[in-house]
Image (cartoon, helix red, strand yellow):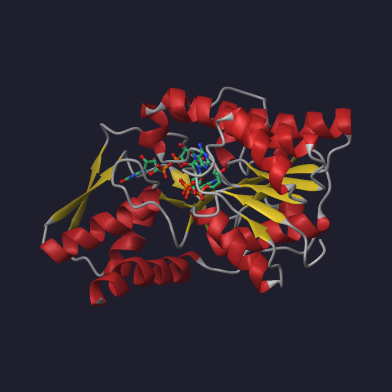
């Protein structure tokens, strides 16, 4: 990409979009187009059409989406399907109509079947039943991948799809009901320590396994893809290692310095038993994650809670 290329980062205030902007700025890019969801609702086809005609971005990163943890996905099922289908359809179609040179679509590891062989290889897509708690979101994300591939094969558009594993980092969502597990646990353990509460409730059985990637590593991989990767289909982005939710809770407990106990509440769903990414495709190109989980969680905790408390 030319250093003065006009790049539209959809979702620039989110955890992923903001990390992408930081990474692109570090590489010397300056010409960004951004809109908040209040300024441009990407579900609105007429508004998206007007925006693309006016701004004519050369590159598009689609990091705007309705996003949330297991409970949000399971509760707001219609919104996760409708919003994401509309956002993807509008942004991808109007990128095509306006001659965007390259588009990067962000999916998620939840597109793979619930019981797919581990680690999850890219060709496991559409080989089995999805996990029910996030089926609407997964169906929308699969549609996004297929849109990119269909616009490539019919119109020759260079649209690529990246599938990140579970992410964490600056600008994460800390809402206790709607967030993902890692920010939720950081907040729960932090508040329990501050209040002297004797135990912290962790959802589910603690046995599901998850892989966590720092969003700065994700942004680095996305930048590499934008510069170097022009293939149909999908590319996994992860660390290639996972841990159980129990082990994650213990890691957060240590990081926060909480001395009470952990209680698992199996009234909450576990979701997918395991979703470890096979990262050999990107590794084959020499890309690997750099930020270890302990180190990443320590940095995020310091940024989100300790510094906030010191203010
Ligand atoms: N977080 C994770 O663990 C993972 C995320 N991903 C993917 O990465 C991408 C980004 O996720 P993440 O950064 O975590 O999510 P965030 O919730 O942090 O950010 C999402 C962004 O999308 C924008 N947005 C949502 N709805 C609309 C809309 N109707 N119109 C315009 N903009 C909208 C929001 O804009 P505004 O702030 O202006 O309201 C927000 O900035 C998503 O595609 C997600 O599926 C994939 C795997 C894991
Ligand atoms: C990124 C990915 O994120 C979602 O999938 P998920 O990985 O299941 O999401 P999660 O982070 O919310 O939970 C991971 C595990 O952790 C357990 N868990 C314990 N205690 C808390 C807790 O306090 N909050 C949450 N949210 N989970 C908890 C929880 O029960 C589950 O077993 C998809 O819907 C989809 O959106 C997607 O793509």
Q: Residue at x 79, y 33 (%)?
A: 149
- Across and down, in percent, residue 192 comes to 17, 59
Q: Within the image, what quadrant is residue 261 found in? A: bottom left
- Across and down, in percent, residue 130 comes to 55, 26
Vertical placement of residue 264 versus 213, above or below: above
Vertical placement of residue 200 versus 234, above or below: below
- Across and down, in percent, residue 14 comes to 49, 52
Front residue of this view, candidates 182 and 15: 15
Left or right: 281, with 192 as reference point: right
Front residue of this view, candidates 68 and 45: 45
Q: Quadrant of the N terminus?
A: bottom right
Left or right: 275, with 75 as reference point: right
Vertical placement of residue 129 versus 64, above or below: above
Q: Quadrant of the C terminus?
A: bottom left
- Across and down, in percent, residue 243 comes to 46, 53
Residue 270 visible in this rendered orientation of the protein: no
Q: Residue at x 59, y 67 (%)?
A: 22
Q: How many marks?
A: 0
Residue 246 visible in this rendered orientation of the protein: yes
């Amino acid at each position: 990409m030319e250093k003065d290329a006009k790049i539209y980062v959809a979702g620039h205030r989110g955890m992923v979009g903001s990390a992408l902007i930081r990474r692109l700025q570090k590489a010397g890019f300056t010409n960004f187009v951004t809109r908040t969801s209040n300024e441009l609702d990407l579900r609105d086809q007429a508004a998206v059409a007007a925006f693309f005609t006016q701004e004519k971005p050369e590159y598009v990163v689609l990091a705007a989406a309705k996003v949330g943890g297991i409970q949000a996905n399971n509760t707001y099922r219609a919104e996760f399907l409708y919003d994401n289908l509309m956002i993807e359809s509008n942004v991808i179609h109007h990128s095509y109509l306006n001659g965007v040179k390259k588009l990067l679509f962000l999916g998620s590891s939840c597109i793979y079947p619930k019981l797919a062989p581990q680690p999850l290889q890219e060709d496991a897509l559409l080989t089995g039943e999805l996990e029910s708690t996030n089926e609407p979101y997964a169906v929308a994300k699969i549609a996004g991948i297929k849109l990119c591939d269909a616009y490539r094969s019919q119109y020759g558009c260079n649209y690529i799809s990246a599938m990140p594993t579970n992410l964490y980092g600056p600008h994460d969502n800390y809402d206790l009901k709607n967030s993902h597990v890692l920010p939720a646990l950081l907040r729960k353990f932090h508040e329990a320590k501050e209040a002297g509460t004797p135990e912290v409730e962790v959802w589910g059985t603690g046995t599901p396994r998850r892989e966590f990637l720092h969003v700065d590593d994700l942004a680095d991989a996305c930048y590499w893809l934008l510069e170097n990767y022009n293939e149909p289909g999908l590319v996994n982005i992860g660390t290639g290692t996972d841990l159980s939710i129990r082990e994650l809770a213990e890691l957060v407990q240590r990081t926060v310095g909480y001395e009470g106990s952990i209680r698992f509440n199996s009234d909450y769903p576990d979701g997918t038993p395991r979703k470890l990414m096979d990262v050999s495709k990107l590794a084959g190109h020499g890309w690997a994650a750099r930020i270890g989980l302990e180190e990443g969680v320590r940095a995020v905790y310091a940024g989100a809670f300790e510094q906030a408390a010191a203010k």
